[in-house]
Image (cartoon, rainbow, N blue to C red):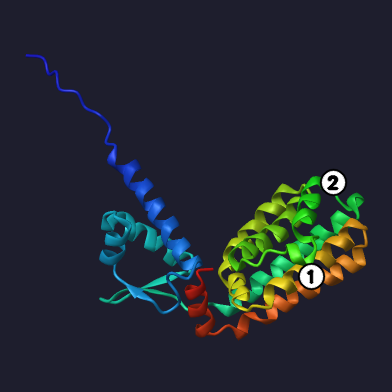
Amino acid sequence: MPNTKTTTAPTSAPARQSRSDEAYARLKKDIGEFKLVPGDRFTEHEISDRLGVSRTPVRQALFQLQQEGYVEVMFRSGWRVLPFDFDKFEQLYDLRMVLELAAVERLCNPSLGNSKINRPLIDALAAIWLVPSEQRCSDARQVTEWDEAFHCTLVAATGNAEMTRVHREVTERIRIIRRLDFTQASRINTTYDEHAKILNAILKNRSDSATMLLRSHISSSQAEVRKITLHQVHLARQQNL
């Protein structure tokens, strides 16, 4: 009797990988939004219940986050969100400074590179940041997102795809620190003021002024990195930044 049994390729692996990716994204977002803060401890079972997925994709996601320096496994006691690595953050800020200063130089002097400057992107930034004080947004979460977009857009506007890619990778790695800036009430108006000055210098092709202002702007933020306290982290969690 002929064997009529058919076989099909297993489908569980891609599905499991997809669930692992989803668990990774959600956990990384929780860390970035201070729902999980440095020192927090948890078990795979707790995360599995909260996310509604099995422990296998949760474990895969946690191992990936461990490789990226966000969490560590504790012997017989689950997992822990790692403290901030301030040395690494400062190095990333240094790299960010190099990339953004180079971008501003090109925006003010298009002939410096082979990239095509995207002026509409700069105009779009002006529509957000060059507004009367009474029209400024007071939502810290929104301004935090606009702040990140401001710096990414400056680099993207150069038209240099590789510079933009590297800058976005750096931006993602320092995002959690930059959000802590906006636990301070004065930070919103300061950000508007400084961004406006940088933009005005760029729009007038004043390279020296633009780079000086940008350097001061980033240096000021970088100087605050080592002043971060656990209180600020918990305050950010309360404010849901």
In the rendered image, the residue lying farthest to the front is 134
Label number found at residue 194: 1
Instruction: List x then y, in percent, for residue 134.
Output: 75, 66
- Above or below, 40 relative to 21: below
Name which quarter of the figure residue 35 lies in.
Answer: bottom left
Q: Earlier in the sequence, mark 2 or mark 1?
A: 2
Label number found at residue 162: none
Front-most of residues 58 and 134: 134
Amino acid type shown at disc 1: Glu
Viewport quadrant of the N terminus: top left
Alpha carbons under labels 2 and 1: distance apart: 29 Å
Residue at (92, 50) in percent of width and height: 111
Residue at (65, 76) in percent of width and height: 90
Numbered disc 2: secondary structure: loop
Front label number (2 vs 1): 1
Quick one: label 1, few (<14), some, or many (20+) residues within 10 Å? some
Residue at (91, 55) in percent of width and height: 109
Front-most of residues 23 and 4: 23
Instruction: List x then y, in percent, for residue 145.
Output: 62, 61
Instruction: List x then y, in percent, for residue 118.
Output: 80, 46
Instruction: List x then y, in percent, for residue 138.
Output: 65, 67
Residue at (66, 81) in percent of width and height: 224
In the displayed structure, does residue 115 sit left or right of residue 91? right
Amino acid type shown at disc 2: Asn
In the rendered image, the residue lying farthest to the top is 1
In the displayed structure, does residue 113 sit left or right of residue 7? right
Label number found at residue 114: 2
Front-most of residues 119 and 215: 119
Name which quarter of the figure residue 206 lies in.
Answer: bottom right
- Above or below, 104 relative to 219: above
